Image: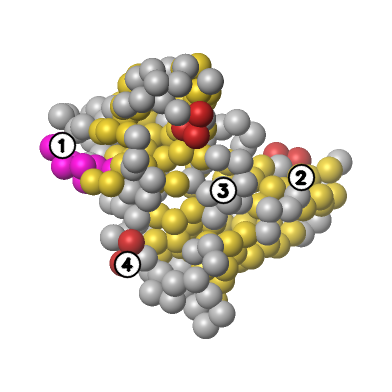
Amino acid sequence: NAGVTQTPKFQVLKTGQSMTLQCAQDMNHEYMSWYRQDPGMGLRLIHYSVGAGITDQGEVPNGYNVSRSTTEDFPLRLLSAAPSQTSVYFCASSYTPGLAGGPGDTQYFGPGTRLTVL
Amino acid sequence: RKEVEQDPGPFNVPEGATVAFNCTYSNSASQSFFWYRQDCRKEPKLLMSVYSSGNEDGRFTAQLNRASQYISLLIRDSKLSDSATYLCVVSTPDSNYQLIWGAGTKLIIKP
């Protein structure tokens, strides 16, 4: 199993450009999420999905769109990049979102995408 | 006040020593608690869940204190490989069980 894969690993954008960060998992997890990690701050949830065709906003959704057409894939789109979106982006998947504290809640992360917006 | 707070450190500890750090959470309705480990420029990985009765996994012990709203992580006989940032994670029904992440405590084990 590859686990959770993300592409690209690094990306530099100019302000106003758009792009899609790819995320895929081969563990048949229903729950997938996108986080951003900034220095001195905890991971912040951008968007999440509880299954194919179902997405919802997290804590910091502005400027980002997601879709979930299959169980495996959960791409994140930056609509018009801004310097404030410079960050490390992690995609994660799990069986459950954190309901019971058991093994099903374990979040499996991709290796991350380091994005710089100039 | 942040929902989940951690001392950012770094904690500089000699190899073989015991080290402990806490994480406080603000929502008394918090239900699930975890410790994740993150190596430099890598993704977080689950270290252990924290159960109400406390739990131990080898050299690592996690405790939950609901009355004072904190969880703790104790590392015994620390190894150089324990150097990492330790992330405290909490979920609550109020947030639709979304995970709330602390900013992490950096641990450096010195030979």
Instruction: Please state which of residues B109 and B23 is positioned toward the viewer in this rendering.
Output: B23
Dot 3 and dot 2 residues touching (CB under 8 Å):
no
Q: Chain of mark 4?
A: B
| Badge 1 or badge 3: first in the primary sequence | 3
Q: Quadrant of residue A62?
A: top left
Q: Please tell me whether the stretch drawn in magenta is mainly helix, strand or loop.
A: strand
Question: What's the residue type where badge 2 is placed?
Answer: Ile
Q: Residue at x 62, y 37 (%)?
A: B39
- The residue that mark 1 highlights is A52
Q: Residue at x 38, y 34 (%)?
A: A91
Type of amino acid at the residue the image marks with label 3: Met
Q: Are marks 3 and 4 on the same chain?
A: no
The lab-note entry on whether marks 3 and 2 share a chain reads: no
Can I make out residue A88 in this image? no
Does residue A54 belong to the magenta stretch? yes
In the image, is B73 to the left or to the right of A34?
A: right
Q: Chain of mark 2?
A: B
Q: Residue furthest front?
A: A16
Is A10 or B63 nearer to us in this picture? Answer: A10
Nearer to me, B18 or A112 = A112
Q: Give the residue at mark 4.
A: B94
Label 3, label 2: how far apart the Cα atoms are: 19 Å
Q: How is the image coloured?
A: secondary structure
Q: Nearer the observer, disc 2 or disc 4?
A: 4
Q: In the figure, residue B42 lies in which quadrant?
A: top right
